[in-house]
Structures are given as C-alpha cells and as structure tokens.
Amino acid sequence: MPKLYSPQTPLSDRWSTLTQTHMSVLQLFFFFAVPLSVLPPVMLYYAGVTYGGRLLPELSAMQLQLIGLVFFLTELAMTFLVAYVVQGLAEWVDRKPAFEDAYKLAVVVPMPLWLVPLLLFIPSFIVNITAMAAALILSSMLIYYSVPAVLKVKEKGHAILLSGSILSAGMVAWALMMYITLLTWNWISVIPAL
C-alpha cells in the first residue's frame, strides 16, 4: 500500500492530531463553525461603534447589527457549501471523502480568517489589511498541509492539485461571502438610520 503523502512542519504532529480527530458534522458546526463565525460580525460591530467613520463608514448600531447578522449567516452557509464543493473536487483525484471530512476541512482551514478580525481592536486600516493578507496565506498553507491527512490523498501530485483546487474554490466562496455582505451594507446604508 502506498505511503500517505504528508508535508512535514514543526507543527505537523499537532495539526495532524486535529485533522485526524473524529468529530461529527454537528460537533464541528457547534464547536468550531458557530463560535468562530461570531468573531467577525462582533468585531465589525465593535469597530463600527467604537471608531465611527475612522476605520469603517459611519453606521448606526442597528445597521451594524443587521450587517453582522447577514455576515454571520453567510459564513455558516458557506461552510456547508465549501464542504460540498470539496467533496466534488476530491473525485478528480479518485477520492470520495465522507461529508464529515470535507466539512472538517471547510471549518478548520479558514481559522486564521475567522481570527484576524480580532485585530480590529487596532484602528489601523494598514494593520488590518496586512493581517488579512497574512491570514489568507496561512489558510492557503493549512489547505496544503490538511488535504493529505483529512482527505487521505496518497500521491503528492494529486495532493497539490486538490489543494490548489480547494484554495480556488475557497477564494470564490470568500469573495461571494464578501459580495453578499457588501450588498447588505450598501442596502442598509441607503435606508434611513434605524
């Protein structure tokens, strides 16, 4: 039987423990997706209320709450959509992962993107944009290191192909999530302050 391809890093052992731990989709949803999805809308609200028009356009607390709610629900929906896409993409390399494994990848890999809004405590556009770029790079690396372990891809070429495909799908999902949020933002900003 061919050896499973596994990129090595100093954190490989800890990461592979997380990626190989058995958790149901429901557990992943309630213990990872929901708590992590709360952070960006809460921090967006905090930045909007605290810094007013310095970091974000000035909106009322109610408008910020509505934008945050839409963003939160969109984040949760995207975890399922991305997991479904990961399952489909894995078939390109002759893998048929369980939805649980695809969902694990969909919620564990974007952790840096969920945590980066904590830097909204710092009212600097440059700091936050730089942190977002770093989070995107880190999430890309997590995809590369997680695909072999979570989806049981044995061949290096297949792992790299699948990682790139999942990264592309994730970027499209992230752009769609931002688009939906910005549409909501636009709609909210043209109605009178609530």
Image (cartoon, rainbow, N blue to C red):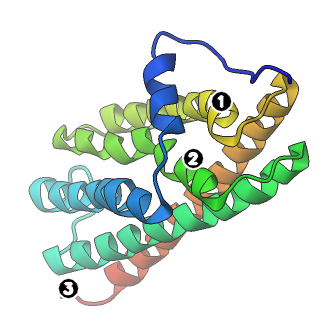
How far apart are the two marked residues, 1 and 2, measured between alpha carbons?
A: 11 Å
Q: Residue at x 28, y 79 (%)?
A: 66
Dot 2: within a 10 Å radius of its alpha carbon, few (fewer than 14), some, or many (20 or more) residues?
A: many
**Residue mark closest to the camera, 2 vs 3:** 2
Q: Is residue 138 left or right of residue 44?
A: right
Residue assigned mark 1: 144
**Residue mark closest to the camera, 3 vs 1:** 1
Residue assigned mark 2: 105
Element under label 2?
A: helix
Q: Residue at x 59, y 64 (%)?
A: 176
How far apart are the two marked residues, 2 and 3, measured between alpha carbons?
A: 39 Å
> Could you tell which of marks 3 and 1 lies nearer the N-terminus?
1
Kindly check if marks 3 and 1 are in contact, taking CB atoms under 8 A apart as contact: no
> Could you tell which of marks 2 and 3 lies nearer the N-terminus?
2
How far apart are the two marked residues, 3 and 1, measured between alpha carbons?
A: 45 Å
Element under label 3?
A: loop
Dot 1: within a 10 Å radius of its alpha carbon, few (fewer than 14), some, or many (20 or more) residues?
A: many
**Residue mark closest to the camera, 1 vs 2:** 2
Q: Residue 76, percent across and down? A: 45, 67
Is residue 67 positioned above or below 143 on the image? Answer: below
Element under label 1?
A: helix
Amino acid type for the residue under numbered disc 2: Leu
